[in-house]
Amino acid sequence: MFSPFSVTGCSLELLRTGERGIVIFSKSQDETILKKLRLMGVTPGTTITLEQKFPSPIIKIVNTSLALDIASTYAIYVRVIDN
């Protein structure tokens, strides 16, 4: 009756700790957030790993860990990479 499905893309906020994804795009009405993400290296095609969700989200890009605020987390959309 129901067909199985899998989620291949989502907002960064929906990733579980340890999951990896490739940034598809960043979406926000606030240009300051988008600029900050670009300066941090969070651009389309970048592979990121969610290292921690609480108390503040921490992502890893290559060998660099970066803390994000919640608004930035909501702005990042990724394609989930199978682990």
Image (cartoon, grey):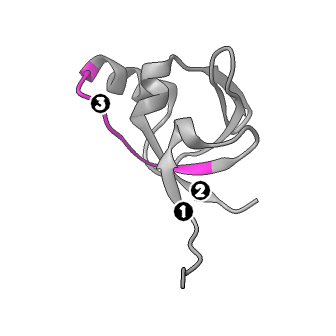
The residue type indicated by label 1 comes to: Thr
The magenta region covers 21-31
Choose between 44 and 81: the one closer to the eye.
Answer: 81
Q: Secondary structure at mark 3?
A: loop
Q: Which mark is residue 80?
A: 2
Q: Quadrant of residue 32?
A: top left
Residue visible at 49% across and 56% down in the picture: 9
Choose between 71 and 34: the one closer to the eye.
Answer: 71
Q: Which mark is residue 28?
A: 3
Q: Quadrant of residue 6?
A: bottom right
Instruction: Please tell me how crowded label 2 is: few (under 14), some (14-19), or many (20+) other residues with Cα within 10 Å.
Output: many
Q: Earlier in the sequence, mark 2 or mark 3?
A: 3
Q: CA distance from mark 1 to mark 3?
A: 21 Å
Q: Earlier in the sequence, mark 1 or mark 2?
A: 1
Instruction: Please tell me how crowded label 3 is: few (under 14), some (14-19), or many (20+) other residues with Cα within 10 Å.
Output: few
Residue visible at 25% across and 22% down in the picture: 31
Residue visible at 54% across and 85% down in the picture: 1
Q: Secondary structure at mark 1?
A: loop
Residue carrying label 1: 8
59 in the magenta segment: no
Q: Quadrant of the C terminus?
A: bottom right
